[in-house]
């Protein structure tokens, strides 16, 4: 349990977000109670960014040290990140149907999210196209670094430059949550940290089971 | 029960689900730890 | 380093001048696609479609032109370059060569568009600023992607899958930029922002290529 304190903390933060997220007073607006979605939907994107960043760091580490473990972890990061990204898109579509009247409003945030997912799908295809392990690790690490930079451009820079976004608060430098009052922020930031840590936890489980799987496969080859 | 308190029922359900999933994930992790220990044993 | 880049650049240029394969096939490609567009629009095309057609045709021409960057020569030749030159010189020379090609292709596409679909541009300076920056951006991104794809067994199929999502930041800001150029000849604040954005993206991609290419190059 020594190294697991952050997992418990993550669950506590999410519990807090679920309980207080439903009870907190939210400012009156035309979207009403659906504003509470912001505690959960935005969390998916931050979870994705968090694990993609882990993948980016692992790709950098692989290129500098050449440890195959870093390649494995980068690959798992992309898989977990894509999962959270898809959750973000689906929850966003449900929310958008109610607030903007259509599941896919033509909005820089949405398009950016979709395209960055495409970049990561391309990463997975690239991996499957190179049979040699060492070469695959090197080439996909290079592409992953590229992909992360593009992801940052898409979610961090492009939406702020455009004037026609439907998401609130694009003018004041904070892309997705401009006009949030202090009360909501007390729920929002802990929720984000909770989601980020939860996704890291999922990533850890995936990585560990993948390491075991690789070990077993190697054993079977040697038999 | 008054209307404004009914939301607590939803909050309670969601909290139980979250705790349940967390406990389940810890159980999976314990299994992984055991498997890793077995791998270490077979390596030595 | 400068001499290496120069030598590699001239080598690529001479190879192309001897074969004339790439540029001829691109001219044919651009001609035929624009002709199809001309036939289906029957001459009355609106500005938005003109703009989108232009960039999409240019995008595909760019992918076609650059996909052979690292596979047209035999692997033994690459081994020879590998021992002779620094990897940074190789990628810079390729980016420079592909940029030259892309600017040429952009101009050819533009001229063919003038012939078949007419001129819709109001702000010439703005449009050409975008065109040059866009050509450079296409070239640098696609050179790096071609290097990545050449490491796999299925170069041509991967090239499209890998490059399109990476090109989209460029493509989106360029389409917006030339949309402005189709309406006004002024360098509006929005246009300057988009130009700066394209320029910044160019810098990022070239820097990443410079830093990462050595890892792809070693075999």
Image (spheres, coloured by chain):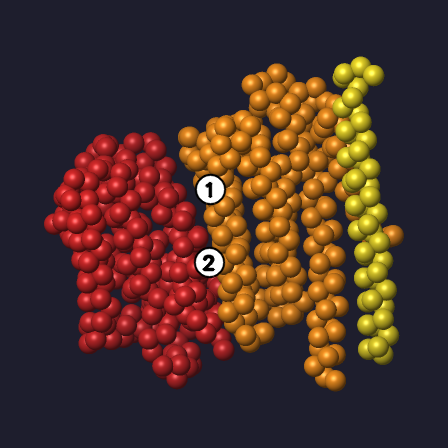
Marked residue chain, label 2: C
Q: Quadrant of residue A185?
A: top right
Q: Is residue A25 above or below residue C214?
A: above
Chain B appears in which tint?
yellow
Q: Are marks 2 and 1 on the same chain?
A: no
Q: In this orientation, does residue C107 appear?
A: no
Chain C appears in which tint?
red
Q: Identify the secondary structure beneath mark 2.
A: helix
Mark carried by residue C31 = none
Q: CA distance from mark 2 to mark 1?
A: 24 Å
Measured from the top left, where is residue A81 in percent x and y? 61, 51
Q: Residue at x 71, y 58 (%)?
A: A206
Measured from the top left, where is residue C65 in percent x and y? 29, 64
Residue named by callout 2: C208
Q: Residue at x 87, y 52 (%)?
A: A1
Q: Is residue A7 above or below residue C10?
A: above
Q: Identify the secondary structure beneath mark 1.
A: helix
Measured from the top left, where is residue C96 in percent x and y? 31, 63
Residue named by callout 1: A111
Q: Is residue A198 left or right of residue C13?
A: right
Q: Is residue A90 above or below residue A20?
A: below
Q: Is residue C74 left or right of residue A30?
A: left
């Amino acid at each position: 349990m020594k190294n697991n304190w952050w997992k418990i903390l993550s669950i506590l933060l999410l519990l807090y977000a679920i309980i207080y997220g439903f009870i907190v007073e939210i400012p009156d607006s035309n979207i009403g109670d659906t504003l509470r979605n912001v505690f959960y939907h935005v969390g998916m994107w931050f979870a994705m960014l968090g694990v993609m960043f882990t993948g980016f760091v692992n790709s950098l580490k692989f290129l500098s040290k050449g440890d195959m473990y870093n390649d494995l972890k980068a690959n798992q990061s992309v898989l977990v990140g894509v999962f959270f990204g898809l959750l973000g898109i689906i929850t966003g579509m449900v929310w958008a149907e109610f607030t903007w009247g259509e599941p896919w409003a033509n909005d820089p945030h949405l398009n950016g999210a979709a395209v960055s997912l495409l970049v990561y799908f391309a990463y997975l295809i690239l991996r499957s196209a190179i049979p040699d392990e060492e070469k695959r690790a090197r080439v996909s690490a290079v592409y992953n670094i590229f992909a992360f930079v593009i992801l940052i451009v898409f979610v961090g820079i492009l939406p702020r430059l455009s004037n026609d976004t439907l998401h609130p608060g694009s003018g004041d430098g904070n892309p997705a949550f401009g006009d949030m009052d202090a009360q909501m922020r007390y729920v929002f930031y802990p929720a984000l940290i909770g989601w980020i840590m939860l996704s890291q936890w999922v990533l850890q489980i995936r990585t560990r089971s993948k390491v075991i799987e690789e070990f077993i496969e190697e054993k079977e080859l040697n038999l | 029960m008054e209307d404004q308190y009914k939301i607590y029922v939803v909050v309670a359900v969601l909290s139980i689900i979250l705790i349940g999933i967390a406990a389940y994930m810890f159980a999976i992790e314990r299994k992984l730890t055991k498997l890793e220990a077995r791998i270490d044993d077979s390596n030595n | 380093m400068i001499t290496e880049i120069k030598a590699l650049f001239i080598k690529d240029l001479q190879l192309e001048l001897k074969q004339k394969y790439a540029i001829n096939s691109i001219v044919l490609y651009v001609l035929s696609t624009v002709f199809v567009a001309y036939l289906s629009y029957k001459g009355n095309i609106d500005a938005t479609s003109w703009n989108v057609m232009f960039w999409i045709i240019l995008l595909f021409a760019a992918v076609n032109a650059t996909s052979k960057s690292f596979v047209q020569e035999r692997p033994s030749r690459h081994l020879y370059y590998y021992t002779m030159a620094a990897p940074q010189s190789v990628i810079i020379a390729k980016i420079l060569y592909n940029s030259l090609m892309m600017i040429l292709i952009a101009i050819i596409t533009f001229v063919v568009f003038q012939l078949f679909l007419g001129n819709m541009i109001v702000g010439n300076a703005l449009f050409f600023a975008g065109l040059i920056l866009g050509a450079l951006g296409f070239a640098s991104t696609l050179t790096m992607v071609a290097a990545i794809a050449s490491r796999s067994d299925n170069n041509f199929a991967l090239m499209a899958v890998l490059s399109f999502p990476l090109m989209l930041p460029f493509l989106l800001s360029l389409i917006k930029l030339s949309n402005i150029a189709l309406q006004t000849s002024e360098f509006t604040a929005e246009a300057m922002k988009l130009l700066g954005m394209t320029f910044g993206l160019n810098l990022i991609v070239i820097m990443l290529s410079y830093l990462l290419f050595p890892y792809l190059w070693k075999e």
